[in-house]
Image: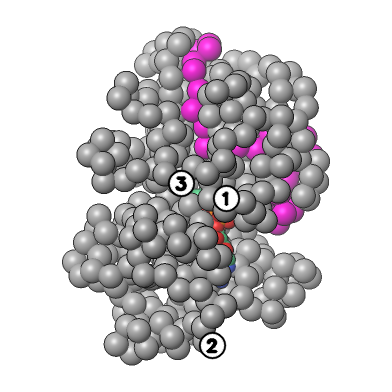
Amino acid sequence: MQAMEYRGPYRVRVDDKPMPRIEHPRDAIVRVTRSCICGSDLHLYHGMVPDTRVGQTFGHEFTGIVEEVGSAVENLKVGDHVLVPFNIACGQCHFCKQGLFGNCHESNPQATAVGGIFGYSHTAGGFDGGQAQYARVPYADFGPTIIPDWMDPDDAVLLTDVVPTGYQAAEMGGIQKGDTVLVFGAGPVGIMAARCAWLFGAGRVIVVDHIDYRLEFVRNFAPAEVYNFKELDDVVTFMKKTTDGLGADVVIDAVGAEATGNILQTIFGKRLKMEAGSAIALHWAINSVKKGGIVSVVGVFGPTGNVVPIGNIVNKGLTLRGNQAAVKRLLPRLIEHVKAGHIDPKALITHRVPLADIADAYHIFSDKLDNCIKPVLLPNGA
Ligand SMILES: NC(=O)c1ccc[n+]([C@@H]2O[C@H](COP(=O)([O-])OP(=O)(O)OC[C@H]3O[C@@H](n4cnc5c(N)ncnc54)[C@H](O)[C@@H]3O)[C@@H](O)[C@H]2O)c1
Ligand SMILES: [Zn+2]
Ligand SMILES: [Zn+2]
């Protein structure tokens, strides 16, 4: 079969790989119908994630038709069209029982923090992902969800990650009615977080980025008040001023470890790699939230350290929350929101790309070219 392969930083290509096969009674094999590239894949593509091995196939946001099931999988049958949550979760361990499906204790032998994730380096279990014609889905009796008949497959593929992640970002913010919610990052995740903030009762939603076409998109889509941080003298001072001098009630970091906007962090974190990338958006989040407020972090940071203003967290009495989204926990609610028209996930898709053009797709998404917001790969044709 044809599959994306990582060759080293900034180098990906499509190559022949052996067909995946059932390795465990709880496995299924799916023929991939759609597969996205995520901002998280860019951390891998940029060589920022430890133990990303040459030859791995990325891709943790995919839908597919069930081709084969293991003997223990009774809830799926050949021919079902499923959406596959990005977390690989057993559904039975101590953490899964609490709905912490991003922190499954069984699916990732390498880590004590994150559970398994499709196509996300050996720090997340070393599984091959869905940027391929076929994929093996472990714990298929638990994870995959049959796509409802009425649902557009383009909406379905975004329910594997972007929508639940944006939703959980807002949820972890503990938004109270009328709150001012500030979101750093206008990528797919930040856009969805801003949209979902309204569903939790926000009174005002502000989004900050430095890419104008994305700010323009989120201004209409969320909708939100938007600012380009390159046009502000000092982001934190500006945000304080525009929120009665006190700061936002809730701030969401939807940027993660490759934030731009501070030269020292860029050199120290991204060039010299003396910390795990640049955490400047997180600094801004901590410093522009109101005293006693909540900072919700969905931006991805590596397992190694980052310099963050811990003193301000303590002295301002902040609550800092973060996690990988627990997709399976949120799906029933989000499927209802999509059905009711509260969220229109497919509006984010700007590019539809054959798998063969994977290198172009990564390049365009990484460099934010051609007004790209979310690229979808079609590994087996449209
Ligand atoms: N926790 C989860 O479950 C989960 C799931 C999906 C993605 N993520 C993470 O969420 C983050 C965003 O993902 P995405 O797909 O939207 O990525 P993306 O790369 O498309 O978007 C990131 C955006 O942040 C902007 N940005 C850079 N520096 C900034 C700064 N200092 N302030 C404000 N904006 C800044 C960029 O211009 C870009 O538009 C990534 O770190 C990704 O790994 C986490
Ligand atoms: Zn993702
Ligand atoms: Zn588990």
Marks 1/3: CA–CA distance = 9 Å
Work out whether residue 306 can be spotted. Answer: no
Look at mark 1 in the image and give the residue it sits on: 372
Marks 2/1: CA–CA distance = 27 Å
Look at mark 2 in the image and give the residue it sits on: 233
- Chain-order first, disc 2 or disc 1: 2
For the residue carrying disc 1, how many other residues have a C-alpha within 10 Å: few (<14), some (14-19), or many (20+)? some
- Chain-order first, disc 3 or disc 2: 2
Q: What amino acid type is highlighted by mark number 3?
A: Leu
Residue 212 vs residue 122, the one in the foreground: 212
Look at mark 3 in the image and give the residue it sits on: 348
Q: Tell me: 140 left or right of 20.
A: left
Q: Tell me: 178 left or right of 357.
A: left
Q: Is residue 91 above or below residue 223?
A: above
What residue is drawn where x is 68% and y is 45%?
A: 362
Q: Does residue 303 show up magenta in the picture?
A: no
Q: Looking at the figure, which quarter contains the N terminus?
A: top right
